[in-house]
Image: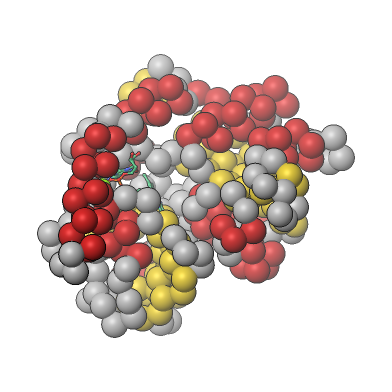
Amino acid sequence: MNRILTKRQLTPETALFEVEAPRIARRWKPGNFIIIRPTPDSERIPLTIVGGNAERGTITMVVQAIGKTTRITVALNEGDSLADLVGPLGEAASIENVGRVLCIAGGVGVAELLPVARAFGEAGNFVTAMCGARSTAQMILDEELRQAASEVVWATDDGSHGFHGNVVQCMRDWITRNPKPDLCHVIGPIPMMRFSAELTREWGVRTYASLNPIMIDGTGMCGGCRVTVGGKVRFACVEGPEFDAHQVDFDELARRNRAYLAEERQVLESHTCRIGLGA
Ligand code: FAD
Ligand code: FES
Ligand code: MG
């Protein structure tokens, strides 16, 4: 179970995996996620379901190595099996036919955006996928996005491809030449989601953000993924991860996601040190 059938290294830090998961492959919807443990003694981490193939009985996930557990996951290879995998979890993304949809993503959020952009396109919308990366070397899934969306706009921090600047600057530039979208969907690092949402509030455009709080059980029991939306407590794993971006308390989300930085740094250092010793 949970065997890795194919692995594709997208960048030095990011890999795409096709994993055996026949029941999830039949039931998943864009916006759903899974919770995995790469090895039996790993912690649990949430990952978006990027794709699924019911005939092959597989799902696709894209992992960016940023800490101990994602590094262990990215180091897995074809033929290895994940220790466990639970899903599909969360509510599906809100997909409707509104006309023009702007889908905005940064970093590994580009992978998470792909199924959502495709679903908006299949629903009959003109979809612009606007994606940010540090540099050309960190751009992922460009070809897949071009097949899924009506147009793809890239912004790179160093100007090596597309717009020179971050995604929010790119949005400000793009709106000078394009009609206002009817709906926006944003996913990525918290500051990027916050500033995108502030801008679309100025535009007066309804916007959904797919949030990334710390998740542990993914079933609404532990409270780890608590977020505040419109002054109300919500649990992103069962009521989200997508919420009205104009109502999200991004300050609280940023604070809670930084709560264990010291511990995360410590386990990563000890993991890196053991790898150095050949463990
Ligand atoms: P750590 O060093 O432990 O943590 C680094 C940072 O990641 C932390 O500071 C914290 O902000 C965040 N984090 C840590 N533990 C968790 C946790 N249990 N849950 C959520 N965030 C955590 N990443 C991808 O690469 N691809 C995806 O498709 C993807 N989809 C996601 C979907 C959802 C619904 C959520 C909530 C997160 C998603 N993430 C995705 C983020 C991914 O879960 C974190 O990068 C990962 O948990 C970090 O684990 P770590 O041990 O490697 O890093
Ligand atoms: Fe435990 Fe959401 S992850 S309540
Ligand atoms: Mg961790």
Q: Is residue 30 above or below residue 76?
A: above
Residue lying furthest left: 41
Quadrant in the picture for the C terminus = bottom left
Q: Position of residue 153 (x, y in %)?
A: 72, 52
Q: Residue 277 occupies which quadrant of the picture?
A: bottom left
Q: Residue 274 occupies which quadrant of the picture?
A: bottom left
Q: Residue at x 39, y 28 (%)?
A: 253
77 to the left or right of 188: left
Quadrant in the picture for the N terminus = bottom left
Q: Position of residue 172 (x, y in %)?
A: 75, 33
Residue lying furthest right: 177
Q: Residue at x 32, y 76 (%)?
A: 77
Q: Is residue 53 above or below residue 235?
A: below
75 to the left or right of 241: left
Q: Looking at the image, can residue 230 be seen?
A: yes
Q: Residue at x 24, y 74 (%)?
A: 81
68 to the left or right of 9: left
Residue lying furthest front: 277
Q: Position of residue 154 (x, y in %)?
A: 69, 52
Q: Looking at the image, can residue 116 be seen?
A: no
Q: Residue at x 45, y 26 (%)?
A: 250
Q: How many numbered callouts? A: 0
